[in-house]
Each structure stands twice: as structure tokens, then as C-alpha cells.
Amino acid sequence: MKKTEGQANPASIPDALSETSSDFLIAEYATLRDEVLKRIELQHQLVSLALIATGTLVTICVQASTTVALAYPILGLFLAAAWSLHNVRVWQMGNYIREEIEENFLDSDQGWEHVRPKGRAVKLGPLPLHGARSIFVGTQVLAVFVTLLISTFPTEDVVLLVLDGMVIMLTIVLLWQPKPRDSRSA
């Protein structure tokens, strides 16, 4: 039987599919790594914004109005929530790269994501991660502490102090919630 134009050789179809699949996984790997880097950059920007906002609001608090600094813990909660979302997504992308992409090209113990431990011996995770988390909570506590030193405790300050206490606790719960379990270590 003569092969007509436009018909593929059946023996070459698996090779073509395998090559296409490999090209797709390589492109997906590069895209995911770029997104991981972008999300990490955004996390650093959020930490910087938290520090700048705290400094600005505490300065205003000392010079003019004590109530202004009490608004920061609420802002800090939203900054921490955005930071936490990026943190979870970075972790998920790294896990996907390790389980779905690296396993198709490398031995089970090779590749950047395979270097990362599958299970953590310390429940709280790595210290640098706690440093970033602590900046959010620390700046919230600092804003409240400065207000406590300066305030004459009018009713609105007392209400905001109570609200800020609840917001700080919510921030702690948000930032220190456990990550989703690694499907490979289960």
C-alpha cells in the first residue's frame, strides 16, 4: 500500500506524540518557574509595603493622631493574606514541578524540586519563612504598642484596640496555617 500525501506513518505517531509531550512539559516547566519567581518578587514587595506603611502610620501617630496607627493592623491582615496566597501557590507549583514534570525527565531523586524535603521534621517550617511572616505580625504589634504609649484612650481607640487584637490573632492563624499535605508523603 502506497502512502498518500497527508497520511502519517503509524509507527511515527507515538514518537511525534512523545516529542510533543516533552516539548509541552519543558515549556510548562519554564512557565511555572517564571511564575514562581514573579510570585516571590511580589511577596518581597508586600513585605516592603508592610514595613513602609508601618513606618508612615507610626510617624503620623506620634506627630498628629493616635488613631491612625490603629488602622494598620487591618491593612497588615490584607497584606499578609496576599503574601500567604502567593506562598501557597509557590508551594503548589513546586510540588507540581516535582511530581509531574521532573519525574517524567529525571530519576526520582534528581531535579531542583526533589532537593526540597518531602516532609518537614520541624512543624513550623524554615526560619526564613517565619521571618517574613513575623514582619506582618510584628508590624501590627508595633502599631498597637506605639498607640498604647501615646493614647489617652478615648472610646474609639479602645474599640480599635480590641478590634486590632482580634485582627492580629486572625493574621497569626492565617500565616501559620499548615500547607496542604504532599500527596507523595501521605
Image (cartoon, rainbow, N blue to C red):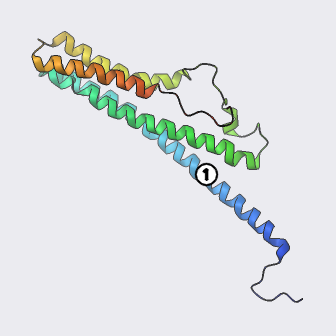
Residue under the point 17% across and 24% down: 60
Residue under the point 26% across and 22% down: 164
Nearer-the-camera pick, 86 or 183? 183
- Identify the residue position indicated by label 1 in the image: 30
Residue 88 in the image: state x and y as whole percent. Answer: 50, 37
Residue under the point 76% across and 36% down: 109
Give left or right: position of 86 versus 76.
Answer: right
Q: In the image, is residue 177 above or below residue 14?
A: above
Residue 145 in the image: state x and y as whole percent. Answer: 26, 13
Q: In the image, is residue 34 above or below residue 143?
A: below
Q: What count of labels does the image hold?
A: 1
Q: Residue furthest right?
A: 1
Can residue 44 be seen here? no
Q: In the image, is residue 54 above or below residue 84?
A: above
Q: Quadrant of residue 140?
A: top left
Quadrant assignment for the N terminus: bottom right
Residue 119 in the image: state x and y as whole percent. Answer: 65, 27
Residue under the point 17% across and 25% down: 68
Nearer-the-camera pick, 11 or 166? 166
Residue 19 in the image: state x and y as whole percent. Answer: 75, 63
Amino acid type, label 1: Ala
Q: Quadrant of residue 158?
A: top left
Can residue 122 be seen here? yes
SS under mark 1? helix
Q: Residue furthest front?
A: 186
